Image (cartoon, grey):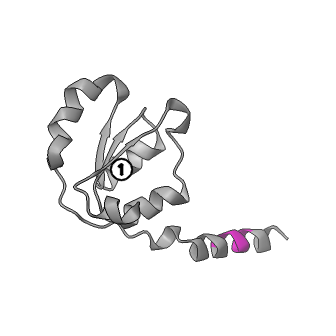
Amino acid sequence: MFKRIGNSAAYLVVFNEGDKDLISTKFFEIVYLCTPILFIGADGAVGKFITDNRIGVHILPENIEQELPQYLNGNVPFEKGCFNVDQYTFPVVTDKFLEVLKKGN
């Protein structure tokens, strides 16, 4: 799956209202591929992260018919670029978690 996403012009992802703030580890695996993301979902942490870091496009569900067609067939306004995901890797997150636990004792 990741090989196909990495070779694509963009990655289309649709989140329901309940997941608009869910940035999982799987999300950063997609970001690591440097493939622009076309995100369809409500305003929240996911859309903000994508637009703030210029790694794709956020389309609100009510605007799908107007906005999505302009990005189909590889017409994505971003060249493949990369966002450094190092700070979100498992070892880094684990170290930060352990630091917080040590401070709590």
Q: In this rendering, is residue 52 above or below 103?
A: above
Helix, strand, or loop for circle 1?
helix
Magenta-drawn segment: 96-100
Quarter the C terminus occupies: bottom right
Measured along the vertical axis of the image, is residue 20 above or below residue 89? above
In the rendered view, tell whether residue 5 sits above or below residue 15. Answer: below
Say which residue appears at 53% left-offset and 71% top-offset: 89
Q: Quadrant of the N terminus?
A: bottom left
Residue 96: quarter of image:
bottom right
User: What is the magenta segment's predominant secondary structure?
Assistant: helix
Give x and y (percent) for residue 71.
Answer: 18, 41
Q: Residue at x 33, y 22 (%)?
A: 62
Residue type at tag 1: Ile
Tell me: 15 left or right of 92: left
Q: Name the image quarter holding residue 73.
A: top left
User: Where does residue 49 sit, x and y in percent of width and height?
Assistant: 40, 50
Is residue 32 on the magenta stretch?
Answer: no
Q: Is residue 23 left or right of residue 31?
A: right
**Which residue shows up at 24% across the image and 65% down it?**
81
Q: Which residue is mark 1?
A: 50
Residue drawn at x 44%, y 45% as measured from the top left = 46
Residue 36, picture quadrant: bottom left
Q: In x, y percent, where is residue 30?
A: 41, 60
